[in-house]
Image (cartoon, rainbow, N blue to C red):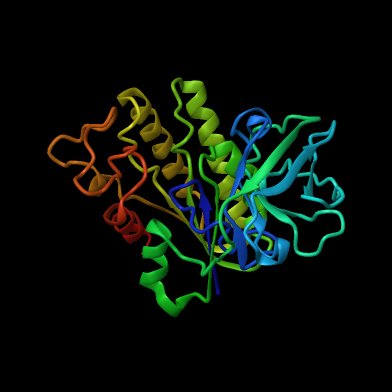
Amino acid sequence: RRAVFVGDSLTQHGQPGKTGPDYQLQFSITTITSAANFGGITWIAYAMVDGRANGGVAQTVAGNLFTDSRGWVAWQAAGDTLGQYVDVSVGGWHYLKSGTYANSGITLAVRGGSAPVPNATSAVQTAGSPITSDYNLIGYVAWVAGAFGDTFYDYEAFAIAGASSADILKFSPQAFLLDTEVAVIMGGVNDLPTTDAACNVTVANLKGIIDIASAKARRVYVQEIFPNPSATPAIVKNLAYVSQMIKAYCATKKNVRFVSAYGKMVNASTWVVGSGAGGRAGVFNPADNLHTQPYGGWIGGSAVV
């Protein structure tokens, strides 16, 4: 029995966790060091070099990523020939192989909503020795997984930091290629809508994600967009409007349930959220007033449980 989480950094865990094809247990901490991620960190959220590369020995220059005129991406490990170009426009997780070297691939987490820059090159650098991933679950996902224990045998988080609802809509199909018992959707906090039109776009995207999930998973839980104390009060109000529209839409679907922890995450005495105000003590990370601390993850996860 499989549980899938779809969203952004609030449900992201592990790098690369268990998500994506050709998952490798070992990976190297990786940084894209030139060409500014082909025009800004907008479409590749992170990259992980296969930790078996170079015989598992620490390395500093791992190789290069290339895009062609179509925006397809290829990987070339240091000293090797260029691998095949791959279409990553749908977003999600992609394992790119180098030309001939064994175990020298790279896993890309691609947001999908932003187009790749064509005909570009970017160096990839690793730091330190390869790490063996033990599929650590952090925050929100950890509390849900821990609460259900052996009810599910597999948890996978198809979630990418910084993903907008448009990004999530693109890579959601990848999350439901396998039989799924439960899907948990949490997206929209990165959209920051300032107009009615922008709100409607977010609503449409979230409806699309719900449709994909409800067609494939037996049960779907849609989490109300978490409070965002770092945003302006106007944006927070718009996100609340989006959540109300999504709540109404969930009520029309037989296997979908809308859940909310909003009221438990903000200060009940003021209900003021936005520009750093209103978050309940211990819920949000004071460094950014957006991501949750363990207590906040527990509150949010408890709503689904």
Q: Nearer the viewer, residue 51 or 260?
A: 51
Q: Position of residue 123 (x, y in %)?
A: 70, 39
- Quadrant housing the C terminus: bottom left
Left or right: 144 in relation to 57: left
Q: Residue at x 78, y 39 (%)?
A: 66
Q: Position of residue 39 (x, y in %)?
A: 66, 27
Q: Position of residue 20 (x, y in %)?
A: 66, 58
Q: Nearer the viewer, residue 193 or 247?
A: 193
Q: Quadrant of residue 295?
A: bottom left
- Quadrant housing the N terminus: bottom right
Left or right: 193 in relation to 77: left
Q: Residue at x 62, y 57 (%)?
A: 175
- Rendered position, 294 above or below 194: below
Q: Residue at x 21, y 36 (%)?
A: 278
Left or right: 175 in relation to 76: left
Q: Position of residue 253 (x, y in %)?
A: 52, 52
Q: Quadrant of residue 4?
A: bottom right
